[in-house]
Amino acid sequence: MKKVLAFGASSSKKSINKILASFAANQIENSNINLLDLNDFEMPIYSEDYENDNGIPKAAFQFKKELNSSDGIIISFAEHNGAYTAAFKNIFDWISRVEKIVWCNKPMMLLSTSDGDRGASSVLKIAHERISRGSPFDIPVFSLPNFNRNFNLDTGIINHDLKKEFNTCVYLFKKNL
């Protein structure tokens, strides 16, 4: 049984990206899903001075342990002002100090969604460009625009064309697992 780690790259308690990440993880048959909440990994804002004075926070080591113990990683990105949320960026900064190979060379699937027409595509592009560097896998990506119009909590993605695109993304991820 494959261990799939998934999270929404947002600190919102009602994160639509966490919902999308969970939905995606549940498409992986015969898997054990570990759905993380970034609020469980709050840390001081990364700075070299803080690290020199206090070391790396335990939460960074715990997050890294969760990544290492998985067989694959699914992240759905929220977009704040065209980029990562502060919560995700801070965790990313800290875990990059734990180990140089941040995402543990695991197969990944990167997603994004928003209530807008672009579906947080700007941050997805940034994330894919950064995370795919050095990855041994081709990382599939999918952006879901207009979340509240295109997603139903009971049935998932409603729009036929978007569902087809999403299913291709899931297929490519599973192929890498």
Image (cartoon, rainbow, N blue to C red):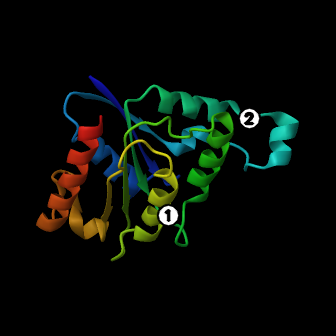
At x 49% / y 28%, what residue is drawn? 68
Residue closer to the observer: 88 or 175:
175
Quarter where residue 62 is shown: top right
Q: Separation of disc 2 and disc 1 at Cα?
A: 26 Å
The image position of residue 112, as x and y in percent, is 38, 60
| Residue 56, numbered circle | 2
Outermost residue toward the bottom in this view = 117
Residue closer to the observer: 80 or 2:
2
The image position of residue 142, as x and y in percent, is 31, 59
Q: Quadrant location of the C terminus?
A: top left
Mark 2 residue type: Ile
Disc 1, SS:
helix
At x 41% / y 29%, what residue is drawn? 70
Decide if residue 64 is on the left or right side of residue 136.
right
The image position of residue 122, as x and y in percent, is 45, 70
Instruction: First in sequence, mark 2 or 1: give its number.
Output: 2
Location of mark 1 (residue): 126
Disc 2, SS:
loop
Quarter where residue 35 is shown: top left
Outermost residue toward the left in this view = 160
Label 2 crowd (10 A; few <14 / some 14-19 / many >=20): some
| Dot in front, 2 or 1 | 1
At x 65% / y 48%, what residue is drawn? 93
Mark 1 residue type: Ile
Quarter where residue 25 is shown: top left
Q: Is residue 29 above or below residue 152?
A: above
Check whether the beta carbons of the residues at disc 2 and disc 1 lie within 8 A of each other. Answer: no
